Amino acid sequence: MSLNLSHIIDQVGKDKGIDKNILIEALESAMLKAAEKRFGPNKVIEAHYQEEMGEIELFLFKTVVEEPENPDLEISFEQARELDPEAALGDSIGVKLDAREFGRIDAQTAKQIIIQKVREAERNIVFSEYSAKKGEIITGIVQRFEKGDIIVDLGRAEAVLPKKEQVRREGYRQGERIRGVVLDVKTEAKGPQVIISRTHPGFLIKLFQMEVPEIYEGIVEIMGAAREPGDRAKIAVASNNSDVDPVGACVGVKGSRVQAVVQELKGEKIDIVHWADEPAVFVKNTLSPAQIARVIVDETEHAMEVIVPDDQLSLAIGKKGQNVRLAAKLTGWRIDIRTESESKGAKEGQLTPEEALRKEVEAAGVREEKERAEASVKELETALGISRPSAALLVGAGYATRESLAEITRVTLYELGINDDDTELILSAVK
């Protein structure tokens, strides 16, 4: 080949960010395939890149014999001696092929193989790049909409914001900038596909890390977050420095830091609460701004009965139960809220008919919910072949059926605390 490949290899490697050795391997493989097509499949042919000359050299190996019967497989002793003075009968000797013998079809074959190898290398680079960004926030441009999903252009790759990872109240137009946290990276036929989310609690946590220097520096630590995306969220913070107020650091001067996060989340209200080692104190903090009279802890049921002044009941429960739901998500405890009047009446055995009826309905609801959950746990345990604790964790997180796991990611399973063996079984079953 008269064309010097060194410059081309260096330039393509630089432009595409592909390792030089991968390109050389692609060229050698392409030329070898073209040679095999030209000279037949039953020949021993090798391809070697000569960096000094910038050429791919091809060698057809032949056996040294006295009288060659098959010129493609054998070479005479005299000819072998001309190529290598130390050649002996029975040796295998490489005869350099003239690349100019290759026709247009051979060159086209080589070209297709090189293009394929370069694309594979590019995909591997992009896959590795974004796999390393799992849990991080990335920015892209809204490209198009497919069945409710938003396809985002990241430049070198495409990201998908699935419908279930979108905030219900948010709307986007083509060409708009959009941010999300990377949940997973999948290998598709057309290239790596990055799955992002705007509803995941990790998105909220990462936004605070970006806005609050004390979190980035490790002075303030985020201990947990719970969201009802688009409406309200709670985040628990602790300080590793007694001189730094973690809540104040996250709020910022005149609320500047928390407002920056609220703005990105399109107005989602955020409660920042003090984390505490003592579960009862932590639950009390998470129910803020409601005032709490006392907390009764039931370790066996992993539940707390929170007693509030009569005028604080609606504040503690929140709009449509939102405040207490988020508090339960954040703390991991079941929380039952009662007024002081109800608590007093219960102690004296003087429940009103309305209160008695409500208690009966609540108890029946709890029993029914427990039975449904137990049935779901058993179903997942059998269908997926996973352990009972893992099945219980899935059901507790809202994945009560096999169908609901259709788009679950490895990251989500890790965050739920599912062990490695069961993670592989789940991903394999729903693939």
Image (tube, rainbow, N blue to C red):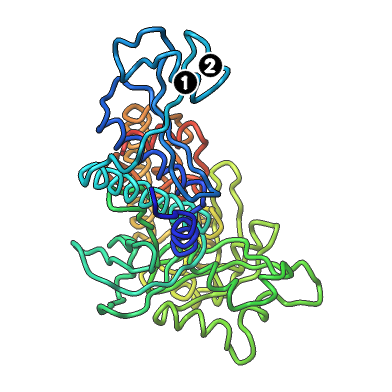
The residue depicted at 28 percent of the width and 66 percent of the height is 151
Left or right: residue 361 versus residue 339 is left
Element under disc 2: loop
- Which kind of residue does numbered mark 1 sit on? Ile
Q: Residues within 10 Å of mark 1 (few under 14, many from 20)?
A: some
Which residue is at the front of the view, 255 or 277? 255
Which residue is at the front of the view, 74 or 422? 74
Circles 1 and 2: CB atoms closer than 8 Å: yes
Q: Residues within 10 Å of mark 2 (few under 14, many from 20)?
A: some
Report the residue that reaches farthest toward the left: 147
Residue 308 at what x, y percent from top left?
A: 54, 69
The residue depicted at 59 percent of the width and 78 percent of the height is 211
The label on residue 93 is 1
The label on residue 87 is 2
Left or right: residue 104 versus residue 280 is left
The residue depicted at 48 percent of the width and 63 percent of the height is 201
Of mark 1 and mark 2, the one earlier in the sequence is 2
The residue depicted at 51 percent of the width and 59 percent of the height is 133
- Which kind of residue does numbered mark 2 sit on? Ala
**Residue 293 figure quarter:** bottom right
Quarter of the image containing the C terminus? top left
117 shown above or below 142: above
